Amino acid sequence: MDNQVVLGSVEFGPNGYESARLIMVLGHERCGAVIAAIAAIQTGEPAPGHIQAVVDALRPACDAAARLPGDLVENMVRAQVRLDVRGRDHRLATPGPASRAWPASSP
Ligand SMILES: [Zn+2]
């Protein structure tokens, strides 16, 4: 997915709704998208439409998770988080329109 689209979606909350004071990023277990991406990677079958871009984006995490013991899906989610945090894109860590929209005195 285009990271600019993701960042724009995150920034929309505090810029589109003045009452939005917190951005919460949620995840969930046993993600169907991750399971489908693993299946596409393992079978080599291309995913339909733009879903292939998601599969391609998740491939490094799948490769990393495949080398680990345990549950492939959970390991892949953790691997993707590590990849994201370690340097794929740190723009969320820098002040942007979302953080500027918050009053400095907000808890
Ligand atoms: Zn999911």
Image (spheres, rainbow, N blue to C red):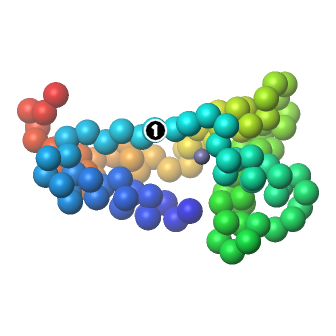
Mark 1 element type: loop
Q: Quadrant of residue 24?
A: top left
Marks counted in the figure total 1
Rendered-image quadrant of the N terminus: bottom right
Amino acid tagged 1: Leu
Instruction: Tell me the residue at 68%/47% (across/down).
Output: 32
Q: x, y (%) of residue 101?
A: 16, 50
Q: x, y (%) of residue 89?
A: 50, 50
Q: x, y (%) of residue 20?
A: 20, 46
Residue 100 visible: no
**Depicted 52 relative to depicted 41: above or below:** below
Instruction: Tell me the residue at 44%/64% (across/down).
Output: 5
Residue lying furthest top: 70
Residue lying furthest bottom: 49
- 13 relative to 106 in the view: left or right: right
Rendered-image quadrant of the C terminus: top left
Q: Quadrant of residue 66?
A: top right
Crowd band around label 1 with a 10 angstrom C-alpha radius: few (<14), some (14–19), many (20+): few
Q: Quadrant of residue 9?
A: bottom left
The residue under label 1 is 26
- 41 relative to 50 in the view: left or right: right
The one of 70 and 87 positioned closer to us in this rendering = 70
Instruction: Tell me the residue at 81%/25% (across/down).
Output: 70
Q: x, y (%) of residue 19?
A: 14, 47
